[in-house]
Image: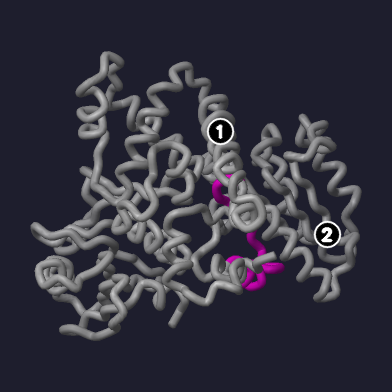
Amino acid sequence: MIARETYLKKLRLLRDQDLIKVITGVRRCGKSTLLAEFRGELLKSGVKAESIIFFNFEERENLKFSDWTALYDEIIAKTNPNHKNYIFLDEVQLIANFEKLVDALFVKKNIDLYVTGSNAYLLSSELATLLTGRYIAINLHPFSFAEYTLAFPEEKNTDRLFRQYMNSSAFPEAVNLSKTAPELVNDYLQSIYDTVIGKDIVSRYKLRNFDKLQRIIEFLFDSIGSLVSPTNIAEQLNRNSDKKISHNTIIKLITYLTESYILYTAPRYDIKGKELLSTNEKYYLVDLGLKNITSTNKYDVNLGHKLENVVYFELLRRGGKIFVGKQKDKEVDFVVQKANNEREYYQVAYTVNDEKAFEREISSLRSIKDNYPKFLLTLDYDNAVIEGIQKKNTIDWLLGK
């Protein structure tokens, strides 16, 4: 098992804090395993097994809880009022009126509460209203490259391993299958895709026209790292089709895709004007392996955009809000707004060995006149500081070297 140290560290810091720990992320990214790992740490620290109460609401034996009050009564009956109890509720959004359950448990001073969910509905529902200021969200993703390398200790060539990482899946179970039954990886990814699209989107929102959703998914999967808007998506999809998709429908379906954590968005930010822009955004795919089941995804094609996708999620793991930067007539791939109100700027390119490519990529960073850190990430082997801009090999950066 690969320890998810980035997320475990957060849980350790949050243990016994008067906050609900809400762990979110796409299905099968490892939320249940993370809770199991943390449960193991609690036991090692001296917490008794009977003080840890774990419910996974995808399990057959828990389908009986149609009423949140009955579940609440069962949980309370298992707790000891004289010491701390750790309550883990996995996929809690499957319980009707789950927000009332969470609220009722939270007010108990002898309970430290952890919940997970596979849809942003968990935090866009009444839960956020009920518990404003009383919860903290931890968004979990498939394996980072650093975690991925731990699954292949026999592979000493990190360049070759990174190429594999960009062209395949980083879902934990998909990584395991790739070593034991690689021919089944796409079948496994298809099952994740079908569950997320079919259950979390089509069924939840009672969509009758699946074809429109599928067309938008394929378009966005093929547009990773490109600026798009509902208007230009509509223009592209309606150009050669009798089945027209409206601007409003596109906005609605994209919202469903981001709420299911299949796609993540990076809005545009005017660096000079210091304001968000309402037109054009970039979308990034939670796992690049999913491209293999929705379109013809040739190995080692569009590596620049795949590299940008990898960097985006690594920046999310490291903390901060991520935007696409606009600097006059130039674009900066990522502006990261850190918690301390400081910024970092990132430009990502597969290579800048060509003089024109180097000038094109670095000019965007050079035009920014503040003193916040600026990075040019490539797969070139040289690391250097150029006019205050840190040029780094992306693999080294991902591995913390």
Between 294 and 371, the residue placed more toward the observer is 294
Can the viewer see residue 113 in this picture?
yes
List x then y, in percent, for residue 233: 25, 33
Say whether disc 2 or disc 1 marks the residue closer to the N-terminus.
Answer: 2
User: What type is the residue that disc 2 sits on?
Assistant: Ile
Q: How crowded is mark 1: few (under 14 residues within 10 Å), some or many (20 or more)?
A: some
List x then y, in percent, for residue 314: 43, 65
Between 78 and 292, the residue placed more toward the observer is 292
Residue occupying image coordinates x 25% and y 39%? 229
Can the viewer see residue 368 in this picture?
no
Residue occupying image coordinates x 38% and y 30%? 252
Secondary structure at badge 1 equals: helix
Q: How far apart are marks 2 and 1 (CA)?
A: 33 Å
Tell me the residue that label 2 is attached to.
Answer: 52
Secondary structure at badge 2 equals: strand
Q: Residues within 10 Å of mark 2 (few under 14, many from 20)?
A: some
Image: 255 above or below 54? above
251 on left or right of 398: left
Q: Do the residues labelled 2 and 1 touch (CB within 8 Å)?
A: no
Between 7 and 391, the residue placed more toward the observer is 391
Magenta stretch in the rendered image: 7-27
Between 190 and 260, the residue placed more toward the observer is 190
Tell me the residue that label 1 is attached to.
Answer: 194
List x then y, in percent, for residue 10: 60, 69
User: What type is the residue that disc 1 sits on?
Assistant: Asp
Image: 76 above or below 59? below
Q: Quadrant of residue 184?
A: top right
User: On the rendered image, what quadrant is the C terminus found in?
Assistant: bottom left
| Residue lying at the far top of the rendered structure | 242
